[in-house]
Image: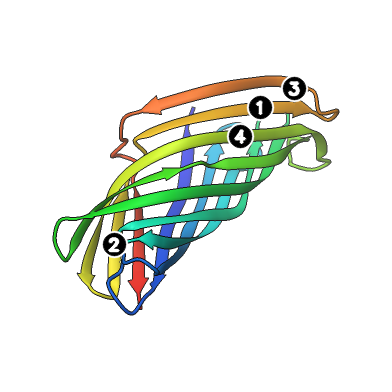
């Protein structure tokens, strides 16, 4: 089976500060944007995935920030017999701690609790005549290590990987009855799927 994949992932952050980037009392604003398109042989159209989650954080102490991301995710998959669409509201509170190595490098660890609450729909092979079939809810926890590089005081670049994660997935029918579920636990940093971000400080 041949697949054609086109994907885009962007992570950005802006910190409003007149002092050092990670000092107590400063804010950090950013988020993630992800788009992926995958064409599978035999399907009428390409599968599509889209997610946007803006986030805001506040430094409650030097090098320690807490905040949350709020956004939306959407996916539509096509098979030879039907199409499946999922959409969800996303909330992801987080806490992040930085450890400075030098003026230009800081390691960090981020603990987040990603949650999504959405709906499932099924349609024909062309993605038309969609009918709601139930709900999908996911609650998880993730620990992501990474480091930030600051070439200047007003510009920074982040590199992060997902080290440890756990997700509890539940699928309900249209009447609200649970019909299936899964629990996933992953450990080990995937350096072949990093998240790279750009930060601006001012």
CA distance separating discs 1 and 2: 36 Å
Say if mark 4 contacts mark 1, CB within 8 Å. yes
Mark toward the start of the polypeptide (3 vs 4): 4
Q: Secondary structure at mark 1?
A: strand
The alpha-carbon separation of the residues under discs 2 and 4 comes to 30 Å
CA gap, disc 3 and disc 4: 13 Å
Q: Which residue is mark 1?
A: 170
Q: Which mark is residue 178?
A: 3
- Please name whichever residue, 92 or 188, is drawn nearer the observer in this view of the structure: 92
Q: Measuring 68% from the left and 19% from the top, which residue is drawn there?
A: 180
Q: Which mark is residue 138?
A: 4
The alpha-carbon separation of the residues under discs 4 and 1 comes to 6 Å
Q: Are marks 1 and 2 in contact (CB under 8 Å)?
A: no
Q: CA distance from mark 1 to mark 3?
A: 7 Å
Circles 2 and 4: CB atoms closer than 8 Å = no
Mark 1 in CB contact with mark 3 (< 8 angstroms): yes
**What residue sits 79% from the left and 43% below the top?**
128
Circle nearer the viewer, 2 or 4: 4
Residue 192 appears left or right of 111: left
Marks 3,2: beta carbons within 8 A: no
């Amino acid at each position: 089976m041949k697949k054609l994949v086109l994907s885009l992932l962007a992570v950005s952050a802006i910190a409003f500060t007149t002092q050092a980037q990670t000092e107590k009392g400063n804010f950090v604003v950013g988020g993630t944007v992800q788009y992926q398109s995958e064409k599978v042989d035999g399907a009428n159209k390409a599968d599509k995935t889209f997610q946007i989650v803006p986030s805001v954080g506040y430094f409650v102490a030097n090098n320690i920030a807490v905040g949350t991301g709020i956004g939306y995710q959407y996916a539509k998959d096509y098979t030879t017999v039907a199409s499946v669409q999922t959409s969800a509201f996303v909330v992801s509170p987080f806490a992040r701690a930085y450890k400075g190595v030098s003026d230009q490098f800081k390691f960090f660890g981020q603990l987040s609790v990603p949650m999504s609450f959405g709906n499932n729909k099924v349609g024909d092979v062309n993605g038309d005549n969609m009918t709601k079939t139930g709900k999908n809810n996911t609650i998880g926890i993730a620990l992501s290590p990474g480091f930030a590089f600051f070439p200047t005081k007003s510009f920074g670049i982040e590199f992060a990987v997902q080290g440890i994660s756990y997700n509890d997935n539940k699928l309900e029918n249209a009447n609200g009855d649970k019909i299936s579920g899964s629990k996933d636990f992953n450990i080990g940093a995937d350096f072949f799927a990093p998240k790279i971000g750009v930060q601006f400080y001012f």
